[in-house]
Amino acid sequence: MVLLGTIFNTITVAVGSSLGLLSGRRIDTKAQTNIVIVFGLFTLAMSMEMIKDMNEPIDIFLALVFGALLGEYLQLHNRFERYASRFNSDGAENFGGAFIKATMLFCIGGMTLVGCMNEGIDGDYNLIMVKSVMDLISSFFLASALGRGVLFSALGIFGIQGTLTLGFHFIGVMIPQELTIDLTATGGILLLALGLDLVGIKKFKMLDLIPALAILPLIHLAHNTII
């Protein structure tokens, strides 16, 4: 079954988040804040590992610039937060912000990209299973600190990882290795922004940066065609 790993990952995040919400009141506010900072620091560490192997830095830079401009023009982040505001009832973090941060933390990373690639092309879901166990623990603490938005990030995982896995299943063998490396590096830069946000250094409109991942393959194609 092609999506077995994604389904398992969705379930683990739903279970971990549910348990975190149930126990959230037993964890004091200071501890919850420290938990979020720890996740931010770990996210920063992961982003550095992903960024260091970039293949074509200029392609990634252009993708981020045009992606940010497109995201701002479409008002992706603001529109989503306006829609999600109707669900707000959490004290520590609004629903939309928690959903976006958790979904990005769980879905934008080397393990996600490589895991979906392995499952889609070879049917090997072992890496996604390892990631699922990590996400089970992460979702527990994040939900206790950020609220219900983390629980609904399970739907984000199913949608994003499911789409990636199916995409790799049908066209994965056609994707050049250097593009995969640069997609991973671009994801690392987005995780860097997320880490800075989680530790409270700088707030970013995270959804406005996402189009960079869709634009990078087009820039990569244009670059190779010109050269």
Image: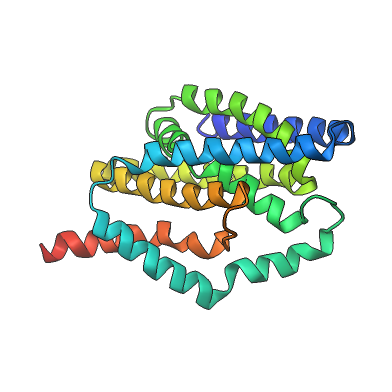
The x and y percentages for residue 38 are 62, 35
Q: Is residue 144 visible?
A: no
Q: Using the rendered view, name the quadrant where residue 147 is placed.
A: top right
The x and y percentages for residue 19 are 81, 30
Q: Is residue 59 visible?
A: yes
* Of the pair 221 and 54, the residue shown nearer to us: 54
The x and y percentages for residue 76 are 58, 68
Q: Residue at x 69, y 56 (%)?
A: 97
In the displayed orientation, state which residue is furthest to the bottom. 73
Q: Residue at x 72, y 33 (%)?
A: 141
Q: Is residue 23 left or right of residue 193?
A: right
Q: Residue at x 53, y 39 (%)?
A: 43
Quadrant in which the C terminus is drawn:
bottom left
Q: Please say if 110 is above or below 217.
A: above
* Of the pair 29 and 84, the residue shown nearer to us: 29
The x and y percentages for residue 164 are 47, 45
Q: Is residue 151 left or right of residue 212?
A: right
In the displayed orientation, state which residue is furthest to the left. 227
* Of the pair 180 and 104, the residue shown nearer to us: 104
